[in-house]
Image (tube, rainbow, N blue to C red):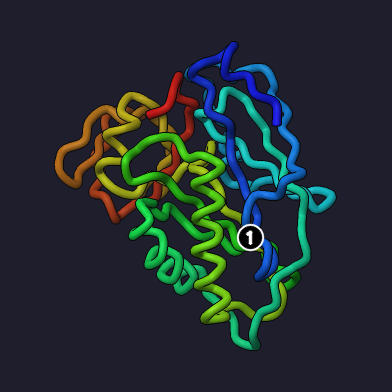
């Protein structure tokens, strides 16, 4: 792996690790890293980027983290996991993953089941409870824990691929602390009554206020969905 830490002491690489068979869930030894030009601070994200899944091409998954200064980390694919004959909903997979991650000091942000109807890709996105950057070692430990739990309970039909990722450019904002950490940055917000992208201007208890072209909008956490829509200048 290329190490640019001497040149860029604030660099935190974007991280994605796959565990696709019972005997191999850790970060592969033959992974490659391509460190590109750092993303400028305060770069807005195209809404289309927020809706699209992380690219999967030629059996290699790529993820981008807003704290990574533009690093793309590729992880070679491995044989698919076997599964049992019943399907696993994202909510069930999330419950299982959260139960094993919390004791290890990780916060589960989301579980996505991509490529349904074919060979599913189960993407588990995590953060650290101490709010420090997620490392490759963190992802390897989380991958082993989640993979072991999924192997034990077999919640997924047929073969599937498991991917563990750091928060990324589409970081979900789920609770008050998430919004407090990203105060001043733009978020993409969706609810029954609202759909907009605007900066987070205030967080009071369970109420979050955003600036929109039509003026301030205050929403209660749990009644809307939000994802980060702007790269922070540094890790938050």
Q: Quadrant of the C terminus?
A: top left
Q: Is residue 41 above or below residue 215?
A: above
Relative image position of residue 35 (x, y in whole percent): 69, 24
Q: Given the current orientation, which residue lies at the most extreme top position?
A: 7
Question: How many tags in the picture?
Answer: 1
Q: Is residue 59 above or below residue 180?
A: below
**Would you identify the image quadrant in which residue 176 lies?**
top left
Q: Given the current orientation, which residue lies at the most extreme right position?
A: 58
| Residue 53 in view of the camera | no
Q: Residue at x 51, y 54 (%)?
A: 141
* Depth order, front residue of 33/125: 33
* Depth order, front residue of 214/66: 66
Relative image position of residue 183 (x, y in whole percent): 30, 28
**Would you identify the image quadrant in which residue 177 lies?**
top left
* Depth order, front residue of 164/179: 164
Q: Quadrant of the N terminus?
A: top right
Q: Residue at x 75, y 37 (%)?
A: 32
Relative image position of residue 92 (x, y in whole percent): 46, 74
In the displayed structure, does residue 164 sit left or right of residue 177? right
| Residue 236 in view of the camera | yes
In the displayed structure, does residue 231 sit left or right of residue 156? left
Q: Residue at x 72, y 46 (%)?
A: 29
Q: Is residue 173 above or below residue 97?
A: above
Relative image position of residue 34 (x, y in whole percent): 73, 28
In the displayed structure, does residue 110 sit left or right of residue 160? left
Q: Which residue is mark 1?
A: 25
User: In the structure shown, which secondary structural element does the residue marked by tag 1 occupy?
Assistant: loop
Q: Residue at x 54, y 73 (%)?
A: 150
**Would you identify the image quadrant in which residue 82 lies?**
bottom right
């Amino acid at each position: 792996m290329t190490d640019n830490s001497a040149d860029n002491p604030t660099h935190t690489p974007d991280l994605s690790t796959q565990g696709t068979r019972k005997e191999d869930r850790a970060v592969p030894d033959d992974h490659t890293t391509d460190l590109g030009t750092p993303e400028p601070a305060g770069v807005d994200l195209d809404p289309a980027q927020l809706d699209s899944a992380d690219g999967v091409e030629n059996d290699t998954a790529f993820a981008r983290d807003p704290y990574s200064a533009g690093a793309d980390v590729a992880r070679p694919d491995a044989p698919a996991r076997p599964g049992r004959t019943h399907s696993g909903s994202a909510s069930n997979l999330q419950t299982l993953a959260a139960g094993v991650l919390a004791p290890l000091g990780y916060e589960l942000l989301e579980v996505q089941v991509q490529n349904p109807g074919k060979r599913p890709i189960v993407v588990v996105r995590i953060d650290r409870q101490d709010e420090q950057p997620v490392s490759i070692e963190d992802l390897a430990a989380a991958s082993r824990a989640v993979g072991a739990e999924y192997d034990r309970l077999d919640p997924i039909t047929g073969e599937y691929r498991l991917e563990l990722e750091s928060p990324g450019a589409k970081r979900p904002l789920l609770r008050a602390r998430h919004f407090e950490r990203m105060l001043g940055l733009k978020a993409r917000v969706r609810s029954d009554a609202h759909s907009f992208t605007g900066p987070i201007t205030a967080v009071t208890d369970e109420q979050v206020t955003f600036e929109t072209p039509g003026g301030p909008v205050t929403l209660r956490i749990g009644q809307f969905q939000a994802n980060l829509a702007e790269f922070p200048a540094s890790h938050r």
